[in-house]
Image: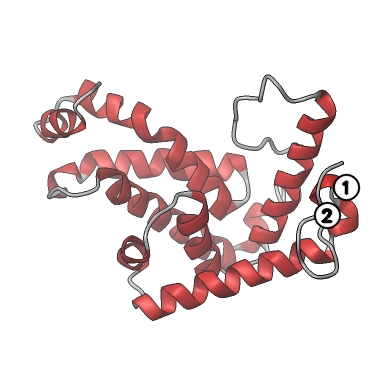
Amino acid sequence: MTDENALISRAQRGHLESFNRLVLMHQDSAFTVAFRLMGDSHRAADAAQDAFIAAYRKIDTYRGGNFRAWLLRIVTNRCYDLLRSQRRHPNLSLDRAGDEDDPEPMEIADSQASPEEIAQQHELRRAVQGCINALGEDQRMALVLSDVEGLSYDEIALHTGAAMGTVKSRISRARASVRDCLQAVRELLPSGYRLKENGTEQQSR
């Protein structure tokens, strides 16, 4: 197994190949976070690429700890910058807004799943992403870091600069909003993923 710390140490001494190997180790996580935050694969790829360039330039500032969390903080900061720019210049993103053909993050298909199940999973992911996109930026970021990337409250607070109580509140409200959003569009979801009136998931037949 590759020693991540050794790669980091060599990358800090300017060894580009070591940094490239770090990129390969973490690029899936970086792109997933960027996609969930941006809601657009093209802008997510741009954000992830910019973040890796920034990480290489400032890797000498890394002082140990969770390298993945350090890297994802750079990714989320870059996404935040792009989202703020989008708010100031909304016309710049109109060409891609609501593009139904926009590809989702690449995932390995379950070899045991039927074509119908694969189609249902794709439809569910699209519905969930639509609900995530509807969140405010702060709640979206907290939810993605928590429920997509599995970061702790402490790590999310470090990422966002928010107090622990604020992080917990944002995640709680974001989950409730996504749950309500999915409930509202449940008729558009595959039958196996619809919610009952009491909010529980309906079992697949």
Question: Looking at the image, can residue 82 be seen?
Answer: no
Marking on residue 55: none
Q: Position of residue 88 (x, y in %)?
A: 56, 68
Q: Secondary structure at mark 1?
A: helix
Residue 90 or residue 135, whichever sits in front: 135
Way the structure is coloured: secondary structure
**Residue lying at 35% horizontally and 76% vertically, measured from the top left:** 164
Residue 183 vs 19, above or below: the answer is below
Task: Indicate the amino acid at tag 2.
Answer: Arg
**Where, quadrant-wise, is the N terminus in this rendering?**
top left
Residue at the extreme right:
187
Q: Does residue 148 appear to the left or right of 90 in the view shown?
A: left
**Residue lying at 83% horizontally and 46% vertically, measured from the top left:** 192
**Image quadrant in which you'd find residue 99:** top right
Task: Indicate the amino acid at tag 1.
Answer: Ser
Q: Secondary structure at mark 2?
A: loop
Label 1: how many residues lie within 10 Å, few (<14), some (14-19) or many (20+)?
Answer: some
**Residue lying at 11% horizontally and 33% vertically, measured from the top left:** 9
Q: Does residue 107 appear to the left or right of 95 in the view shown?
A: left
Residue 33 or residue 44, whichever sits in front: 33
Marking on residue 191: 1
**Image quadrant in which you'd find residue 133:** bottom right
Label 2: how many residues lie within 10 Å, few (<14), some (14-19) or many (20+)?
Answer: many
Q: Position of residue 84 (x, y in %)?
A: 50, 65
Marking on residue 194: 2
Q: CA distance from mark 2 to mark 1?
A: 5 Å
